Image (tube, grey):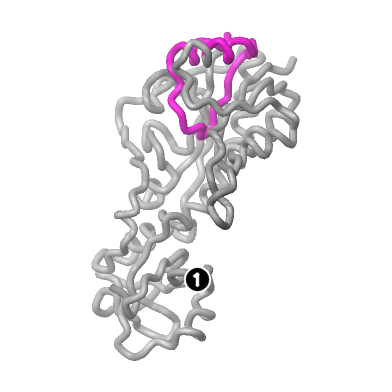
Amino acid sequence: MPLRLIFMGTPDFSVPTLLELVAHGHEIVAVYTRAPKPGGRRGLQLQPTPVEEAARKLGVPVLTPKTLKTQEALDEFRAFEADAAVVVAYGMILPQAILDAPKLGCYNLHASLLPRWRGAAPINRAIMAGDAESGVMVMKMDVGLDTGDVAMAERLAITDNMTTADLHDRLSRLGADLMVRAMAALDRGGLQLKKQSEDGVTYAAKIDKAEARIDWRKPAREVLRHIHGLSPFPGAWAELENARVKILRCELAQGAGEPGAVLDDQLTIACGDGAIRIIELQREGKGRMQAADFLRGVPLKAGAKFT
């Protein structure tokens, strides 16, 4: 029998899970997401979240409450008589009364190998820290920050050529499949839960734009992981000839020199130890472009340096 589910999510990352649950026959009785925000070319049009857009196409009721802490919000949530709630990057704290409302509980899809990288930015932080792997986990939610008992997990290797966008997309698809399997096990009464370890707890703090400036004094691999962990947003940056340039993709390269120095005509840049080669970048006020296209428009002089 399909489950009656409330789905709670907001960004692109959440959409594959919503679609897979529907495709596998579960009844989505309501979708909760964040309220539309001003956007568009002039910043005046209200832009629905990716989850709201997907839900509207599916014909599912959409709710965008500002809080879940009122009695009115709780009564509305309970009225759906859901078996369970599925939460994927919703972006709002669920109080205990909401967590207790579905008879089988609330289940969160988290993009890390808990207890490592609890919190807001697990994908970015895993890349920036040089982790060898990441993954997705389904946990039964409690009132703590990603502290609930874990039901199922899938692992994924992180390579040096992966940006946050790359890992985000792969984990989003992997997570959708994992949540479908978790809900199938829940429906059968066979979903087993295991407490998280107290060892290895780390927190993935929200990305601060102040972190984005590149420190060329660091070893090349640390510079690369910093760049890829902030790509595409907010974008790691440096200054070249008094203009800000975001670097979006790079690779390790041979070479040595003063940190930040341009070593050749292929945009190889010296780091504190070793070098990187820029593959994709974005000038301030311009679109993203390949390094070769950048060099055709901005011929670099001998001694050019990123600072």
Q: What stretch is highlighted in magenta?
A: 74-103
Give coordinates of residue 204: x percent, y percent. 35, 40
Position of the C terminus by quadrant: bottom left
Above or below, comparing residue 1 to residue 210 in the picture: above
SS class, disc 1: loop
Q: Which residue does the image show at 56% across and 28% down from the upper left?
A: 64
Above or below, comparing residue 235 to residue 88 in the picture: below
| Among the 4 quarters of the image, the one containing residue 57 | top right
Position of the N terminus by quadrant: top right
Q: Is 153 on the left or on the right of 60, as rendered?
A: left
Front residue of this view, candidates 232 and 73: 73
Front residue of this view, candidates 113 and 123: 123
**Residue identifier under label 1:** 286
Q: Which residue does the image show at 54% across and 80% down from the upper left?
A: 293
Q: Which residue does the image show at 35% across and 25% down from the upper left?
A: 197
Q: What residue type is labelled 1?
A: Lys
Q: Is 130 on the left or on the right of 194, as rendered?
A: left
Give coordinates of residue 181: x percent, y percent. 64, 27
Q: Does 95 lie within the magenta span?
A: yes
Dot 1 alpha-carbon crowd within 10 angstroms: few under 14, some 14 to 19, many 20 or more: few
Give coordinates of residue 16: x percent, y percent. 64, 39
Front residue of this view, candidates 249 and 211: 211
Instruction: Give the number of callouts.
Output: 1
Give coordinates of residue 174: x percent, y percent. 59, 40
Q: Does 247 lie within the magenta span?
A: no
